[in-house]
Image (cartoon, grey):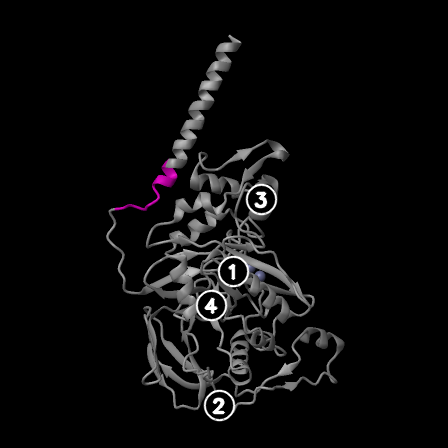
Amino acid sequence: MADILSRNNKRQSWVLALAGILGLIGLCSTGRISADEPAASTSPRWWKGNLHTHTFWSDGNDFPDMVSAWYQERGYNFLGLSDHNVLSQGIRWDKESKLTKKGGADVISKYLAKFGPAWVERRGEGDEAEVRLKPLDEYRCLVEERGKFLMIPSEEISDKAEGVPVHINATNLKDPIAPLSGATVSEAINNNLRAVHDQAERAGREILAHLNHPNYHYAVTAHDLAHAVLEKHFEIHNGHPGVNQKGDHHHPSMEKVWDIANTIRLVELKAPPLFGVATDDSHDYHGKSGSSHPGRGWVMVRATHLTPEHIVKALKAGDSYSSTGVTLRDVRYEKSSKTLRVEVEPEAGATYSVQFIGSLKGVETAGTPIDTSKLSPAEIKELGRHKHKYSDKIGEVLKTVEGPTAEYTLAGNELYVRAVVTSSLLPVDPSWEDQKQQAWTQPVGWELPQVKK
Ligand SMILES: [Zn+2]
Ligand SMILES: [Zn+2]
């Protein structure tokens, strides 16, 4: 009898295991890649993506496959899950008690409801109950679809220098990179960027590095950003409400930091300006107010194909813009006529204002040291690493156009010009109270001195 039971149990567990495997194959074979799809168009188009997001692999509060599905279901085309100092690779089991503490009591049941028990792997009971965090290579087949949605392996290299956070996102990594730090903030930035560059060379792949949230703890100054010339990209917008996007009475806003850094680069360092990206930096997927939700900032990238290489190459070339809600039909800089044209895809009920912003040649870039003699010790502490005040003529508004289409022709005395479009509408889920939907184009019209060979 015992033998028959055990044989039956064995048979049952084989059947269950087989059903499980078939279930997984079922989930993944719905994977929508098929050979009879029409050939992809070779004309460039806009792809929407988020490069900066967190999951249970670090301090986010949902499973990576759940987070990926969130973006895939909302019309994004690419996503980099960039957890702190880790790539989602290999075997990883986490205590269910730890995950429910982060994501809420129903975080496992929501996961089960979404993907089913054949997908969700659990073991142990009671306090010992664990659930497996899937690595990217296993879950990507659930969400990816050729020409529609792409996962790009990413990491937030989360470093510290001079007592402040220095975070750099690396998009399309092959292997994780451990933070390298440095004696100064600039040195830490450069050390990590070199590691990214070395991996790209070794692995023969396109990898994008961008500096995250410079105003978080007011850690990275415009001076740092300017002088770390290996840095080519940074976050002009980060959707996390705690990153001091707007600055304060002591510190410049993120946009002003961009203009100061770009002006110093072009005037003093003869280096190209930084390109901007907007990201979510989302950690919270369960709607807690005041926290970092998904869907607040993204990049639109113009490329012919939805592959990591095409996306990263287009970002490196500056063929992209950043958005918190405004969609552009087109943004184009015509070199022959030195004209930047912006055309908004208008939304019903919205009005638009387009500002062209730049610095003019001859602008003062040295800045003046902030007089701290009249500041209290608390104010000096608040000031942190920001010791300089820069001219208001850096990043001035050169022209404003009301309406969804606008153009600016350079007169010849500009160091660069960029456009920022502001809608009358609020974002769906604003990061702060009076926030408006915006889009930021990349700086154009800049020139570097010819290097004699
Ligand atoms: Zn960060
Ligand atoms: Zn982050």
Q: Residue at x 55, y 50 (%)?
A: 61
Label annotation for residue 170? 1
Magenta region, main secondary structure:
loop
Q: Nearer the viewer, residue 83 or 377?
A: 83
Q: Which residue is mark 4?
A: 277
SS for callout 2: loop
SS for callout 1: strand
Q: Position of residue 178 (x, y in %)?
A: 60, 56
Residue type of the residue flagged with mark 4:
Val
Residue type of the residue flagged with mark 1:
Ala
Label annotation for residue 361? 2
Distance of mark 4 from mark 1, alpha carbons? 13 Å
Residue type of the residue flagged with mark 3:
Leu
Magenta includes 249?
no
Q: Which residues are magenta?
A: 26-35
Label annotation for residue 99? 3
Identify whether 113 is placed above or below 309.
above
Q: Is any atom of residue 290 visible in this view? A: no
Q: Residues within 10 Å of mark 1 (few under 14, many from 20)?
A: many
Q: Nearer the viewer, residue 125 or 121?
A: 121
Are dots 3 and 2 in contact, CB under 8 Å? Answer: no
Q: Position of residue 6 (x, y in %)?
A: 51, 14
> Picture quarter containing residue 447?
bottom left
Identify whether 75 is placed above or below 35.
below
SS for callout 3: helix
Q: Residues within 10 Å of mark 3 (few under 14, many from 20)?
A: many
Are dots 4 and 2 in contact, CB under 8 Å? Answer: no
Distance of mark 1 from mark 3, alpha carbons? 26 Å
SS for callout 4: strand
Q: Residue at x 61, y 86 (%)?
A: 367
Distance of mark 1 from mark 2, alpha carbons? 34 Å
